[in-house]
Amino acid sequence: MAKNRTDELPVELIGEIAPEKLIQSQKEDSDIKVIIEYKNIDVKPGWHDVSRHGNKVKTYWNQSDSLEFKNGILCRKFENISGDEIIWQIVLPKALKRAVMEQLHNNITSGHLWIKKTLAGVTNRFYSCGLRSDVEQWCKTCDICASKKTPQRKANAPIKQYNVGAPLERVAIDIMGP
Ligand SMILES: [Zn+2]
């Protein structure tokens, strides 16, 4: 099966964040810069080089084979489960996390999409350690979402005690349709 392999980063991946800013922020990120330095000299560091770093560097190191520069931006190659599609996710520096979440969650076109859609929007474009929980947290603490969210309808009727005179006097039967 032909893969939808793209060697170029689609422009819309970057959105309102200038590529120069992304490149600069990646170089300044305390975790990402360690990986960039190794990538620049085209050496995969051994575990003894990485072990002194924090968990985030170790996570990026584990992904090292999937990390490549695209237009000077460090990206992660992500293949979907069926293996027929590859997307390039921009490795997101800590400094830009907030701006990205704001852009994808808050802006008018995305219109305060709830966690699942915001997550899909972010992870289709970006990769970073702990991004998933950051997005979830961001959505949960968004005041506008909280005010818009309608209470969920209860799936089950509340449990209620009936006073019955004798056993099996009142039996409720749910009949399921075909
Ligand atoms: Zn919101």
Image: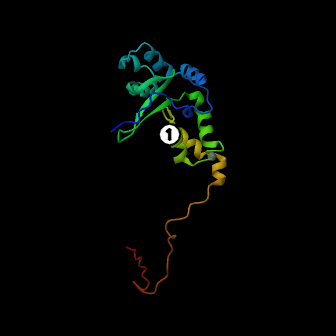
Q: Please give left or right for residue 99 compared with residue 32 in the image.
A: right
Q: Residue at x 59, y 38 (%)?
A: 101
Residue extending furthest toward the front: 2
Residue 31 visible from this viewpoint: no
The kind of residue tagged 1 is: Arg
Q: How far across and how far down the image is residue 39, in percent?
A: 43, 17
Is residue 173 found left or right of 162 in the rendered image? left
Q: Identify the residue at horizontal 51%, vertical 74% (top origin).
A: 160
Residue found at the very far left of the displayed protein: 1
Q: Nearer the viewer, residue 177 or 164?
A: 177
- At x 62%, y 55%, the residue is 149
For the question of whether residue 81 can be seen, the reply is: yes
Is residue 112 depicted above or below 79 in this figure?
A: below
Percent position (x, y) of residue 94? 56, 28
Residue found 66% across the figure and 44% down from its top: 108
Q: Which residue is mark 1?
A: 132
Dividing the picture into quarters, in which one does residue 61 lie? Answer: top left
The image position of residue 172, as x and y in percent, is 43, 79
Q: Secondary structure at mark 1?
A: helix
Q: Position of residue 82 (x, y in %)?
A: 35, 42
Please tell me how crowded label 1 is: few (under 14), some (14-19), or many (20+) other residues with Cα within 10 Å: some
